[in-house]
Every structure is written in C-alpha cells, then in structure tokens.
Image (cartoon, rainbow, N blue to C red):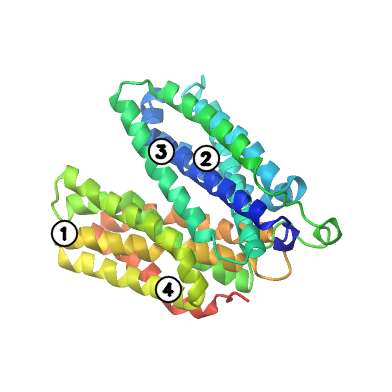
Amino acid sequence: MSAAAVHGTPAQIRQATWATRSLFAALGVLSAAWGVHIPSVKAHYGLGEGALSLVLVAAASGAVLALFFAGRVIGWLGARNAAALCALVMAFSLGMALQWPSFALLLLSMVVFGSSLSVYDVAINTEGSALESAGGRPIMGGLHGMFSVGGMAGAALAAGLLRGGVPAPWQLTAVGVGIAAWVLVGSRWMLPTAPDTETSAQKPHFAWPRGALLVIGLLIFAGMSAEGVMYDWCVLYLQQEVDMPQAQSALGYAAFSGAMATMRFVADSLRARFSEQRLLRASGTTTALAMAVVLLSGSPWVSLLGYAFIGAGLAMVVPILYGAASRVPGTTPAAAIAAVSSIGYSGFMIGPPLIGGIAQHASLTLAMGVVVVAATILALSAHRVPEKV
C-alpha cells in the first residue's frame, strides 16, 4: 500500500482519521486487559515463574514472526479488512486465555494472539501513515496518544472489575467480545487502502532492514527498550531505591504514562512546525537528562517529576520514526513499518530482562541507566532520520 492509494474527500479523510483513532484506543484497551490479567493466567494454570515466562515469550515470538508476513496480509486484504480480521482473532484469543484445557493449547493460542496483535498494529499504523499523507498534516502522534488513553482506560476498567469481584474469565470474555464489535464497526469508517495492483507486485511485502530502514529500526529499538524498561521497572525503582510506599510509587507509573499520552496529542502540532530531526534530538536529550536527574537525586518528588519528563520525552519517538519509515522509497509503507517493527518490538522483549540481569549483578539504579544510554543514542542519531518532504 502507498499513501497515494488513499482517496477521499476532506470529510471522508477526517471521518477515517477518527475511525483509526478509535482502533488505536481499542488496541490500548485490549493490551491493558491482557497485562492486568497476566497474574490471573499464572494462578489459573498454576504456573511457576519459568512457565509464565514461556507464555509471554510465546506471545512475543508470535508478534515478531508475524511481521515477516504482515505486509503481504495487508497488501492482500487492505489495512481496513486486515485490522477487522485480526481484531476477531486477537479478541477470541484474549477471551479464551483462561478457558483452555491444557498448557500446550494456551501456548499455541498465545502465538496466535501475538501474531494477530502484531499484524493489527502494522495495519492501523499503515492506515495512519496513509491518512497523514493524504490529509497533508501530521496525525501519528494523536493516534498513538489514543493508544495510551485506551491503555489507561483498560487498566482502570480491569481494576474496577477486579475490585467488584467479577471473575477474571468473564472479564476477558467480555473485553474480547467488546473489542471485536468495536473494531468491526469502527473499521467500516476507514478508507479502503488496497495497494495499486500495477506497482504492488513490483514491491516487496517485507523489506529486510538495511540502509535507512535499519537505522530507523535500531532507533525504534532504543526508544522501545527505554519505554519497556519504564513500564516494567519504574514502580519497583521508586519502592526499592527511593524508599517510597507502594501507594505513592504507583504515582510514578501514572506520571510517566499520563505525560506520554498528553505529549502525543501535542506532538502533531509540533511535527507540523518543527524539523522531525530536531524534535527527535530534543526528545532524546530530555529523556536522558531527566533520567539522569532521577538516578542522581534519590528524591521521591524529584523522581515523580522526572518520570513525567521521561514520558514526555519518549512520547514522540515512535510516531516520528514510524512516519519516517513509511517514507523510505523502494517499498510499501506496510512493509517498511513491519521491517522496523521487527527490530523495535525486540526492544520490549530485551530491555526489561536486561535490566533484571544488571540489577541482579549490580544495582537497580545502575540498571536504569540503560534508559540514559538509549535516549542519548536517539539524540545523537537524530540527524540520520529522513525528513518530511
């Protein structure tokens, strides 16, 4: 698919943009529901730490492997139909997560879950990139902001249902059915984005990351590693290293994710006014400095403020880099986004465990310095990212 394949009146493009925003929010809700109920999976199947790790690895492996055929699926079905189909599969997998009669079936379902989620993610990002080009204005930041909002809403919903005593299997089934209906309705308002048949046969459906795509993929890896570390370790850092009570430590997660969501909605206006290289450099510098202050201060309130700056700093990284990948010539946006995602997703897989290893052999404070290193790489390499034309 190419951005030029999207056609519609300004009103239709606005309508499709709102539909795509809703699909990003749906992914956030579903991802949060799964994340909240990982302990439910552990308890339901009686899993130890090692077996639970296999479940998470199965989902992550499915997500990465699917990126090798995501471009072909989207090229065949179009982003709209691919998103709808994948929503059905991942909603079914989520709803069944606590229903399988054996651990082996659970692992298989997690591979399918990760694969469908991955292709869905590429499909909606491809649609967003095409709409951004067709509409002549940046929208990727707002789309990813809706994912963050959906994630916060999904976590709050799951927490409320748990406090209300609703059984976990019922919750996941209800969320699965709701997400499937949500996406099936919302996707109908997206513009059809099937590729031009004359050129699609000449372009690869998966682009091996090299040249500009490799650089962008490595930068997404750095950004996603830092983001994954913050999501998984920021609360424990405040408890263990800063001696904050558990209730107050949770504010750190809220400060980080809330600032990230807010900044993503501001990001589009900034991208319209400033060079993306300059914005990426500022993002990396802000994140590195804020994390360094947090690690050096040891102050609870300085740490909370620092977390907010880190969230704001990382907010624009993925929207900027996905947009840059879609502009690399010689391939389709779907294939380009899948290519850089194949590297970037591994940041979520490698970053958090890397922190655990460093923390075990040194300290968590030293381990969290990985965020400083990743952000510094982003700042110093910003000039390698292709600018908008």
Q: Residue, x 22% and y 58% (percent of image)?
A: 304
Q: How many marks?
A: 4
Query: For the residue labelled by badge 1, is the local secondary structure a helix, a strand or a loop?
Result: helix
Residue assigned mark 4: 377
Query: For the residue labelled by badge 3, is the local secondary structure a helix, a strand or a loop?
Result: helix
Query: Badge 3: how crowded within 10 Å, few (<14), some, or many (20+)?
Result: many
Which amino acid type is shown beneath numbered disc 3?
Answer: Gly
Label located before the other in sequence (3 or 2): 2
Query: Badge 4: how crowded within 10 Å, few (<14), some, or many (20+)?
Result: some
Residue assigned mark 1: 301
Which amino acid type is shown beneath numbered disc 2?
Answer: Ala
Residue assigned mark 2: 58
Can you say which quadrant of the picture contains the N terminus? bottom right
- The alpha-carbon separation of the residues under discs 2 and 1 comes to 38 Å
Q: Position of residue 47 (x, y in %)?
A: 39, 29
Label located before the other in sequence (4 or 1): 1
Which amino acid type is shown beneath numbered disc 1?
Answer: Trp
Residue assigned mark 3: 154
Q: Position of residue 226 (x, y in %)?
A: 39, 61
Above or below, 304 relative to 248: below
Label located before the other in sequence (3 or 4): 3
Q: Is residue 150 visible in this depiction of the protein?
A: yes
Quarter assignment of residue 214:
bottom right
Q: Please name whichever residue, 382 or 282, is drawn nearer the observer in this view of the structure.
A: 282
- The alpha-carbon separation of the residues under discs 4 and 2 comes to 30 Å
